[in-house]
Amino acid sequence: MDLLDSKNINNRIKKRTVAVAIVVHLYLTLFTLGFWLIFLTVCGLVTSTLLRNDIDEAVSSANSFNNALPFKYFGQVFTHIQHIFHHPIKIEEDIFSTVETEIKSKTPITSLDPIVITDKNKDLLASEERTFLKGEGTSTIRGTTITLILSQSSFGAMRSFEWRVIVGGYVDNDAKFKLIAYSPFTLLFWIVPYLKRETNLLSRVRTIYSSAYNDIDISTQVRSISEAVFDAMVVAIEKNGIDTSDLKAQKLQSMNINISGGKVNMGNIVQGAMNKIGAAVKGAKA
């Protein structure tokens, strides 16, 4: 995954963005007799350095995190579904195998590969590792990546199976310029959560390109992956003698599409995804 690969999008700093920034900072520099330029330089250097550290860290250590945001390298979690069932023995290998077969036969995802993600929280006496299965779909023509992450855990004889569909964008050069250029106005709002490791700057400049066609492509891929996983889950669980009526109801609730009055109301998977797309785009362009 290349964070700078924008595919068919011209990833540039817009002339209007530069012009507005110059006018704003020139006015403030004159108004403050030059002191604003010093403040801008300090804030810009701090923001630029921290942003570069976040990008380098995401690229070099995609398999580790500190307390929060374990999947930050892959993007934003757009779909997170958990299904709980009871069974006296562990059947996760059977479920994973069925899911992989279904995914490979119905989508461009060619394999589900194990990935170990380590929590390196400094408050822990020892780092904690957990293993997930990862499948990568094809990128959209506008540089949006789709990643499937699966995991399983147990609590006695209760079994939990989870999957996440993660949507990732490219690092937007225009958003980077805005973040640095307007850092004197924004730094105080994000520096404390940043130091607490509750957020990072990569998410502020990583853009999911906003367009009707890209939204269609994302919606199709997100829904197709979840549909395939749901179907595989039903097959695997029924094969082991477990009632799947609640799983089928969960699928209907999650994947439903209702059309009324010419307006499309999408199920929570896609609607949540589209809401996050809008938030990501607005955040990058702010």
Image (cartoon, rainbow, N blue to C red):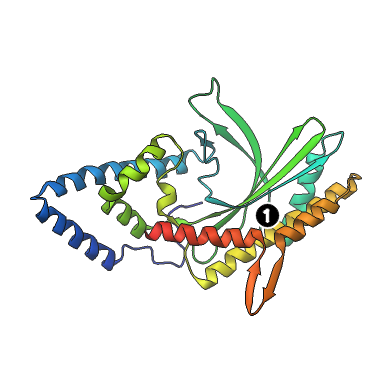
| Residue identifier under label 1 | 110
**Which of these two is toward me, 101 or 236?**
236
Q: Position of residue 101 (x, y in %)?
A: 77, 53
**Percent x, y of residue 9:** 43, 66
Residue at image position (37%, 40%) is: 53
Name the image quarter holding residue 199. top left
Q: From the image, which quarter does the C terminus lie in?
A: bottom left
Residue 107 spot, x, y in % from top left? 69, 60
Q: Quadrant of residue 220?
A: bottom right
Left or right: 119 with respect to 251?
Answer: left
Residue 108 visible in the shown view? no
Residue lying furthest left: 33
Label 1 SS: loop
Residue in the image at 63% along x and 62% along y = 270
**Residue 169 position within the rendered picture, expressed as x and y whole percent measured from the top left:** 48, 57
User: As displayed, is residue 266 above or below residue 188?
Assistant: below
Residue farthest bottom in this picture: 262
Q: Is residue 285 visible?
A: yes
The amino acid beneath tag 1 is Thr
Residue found at the far top of this picture: 125
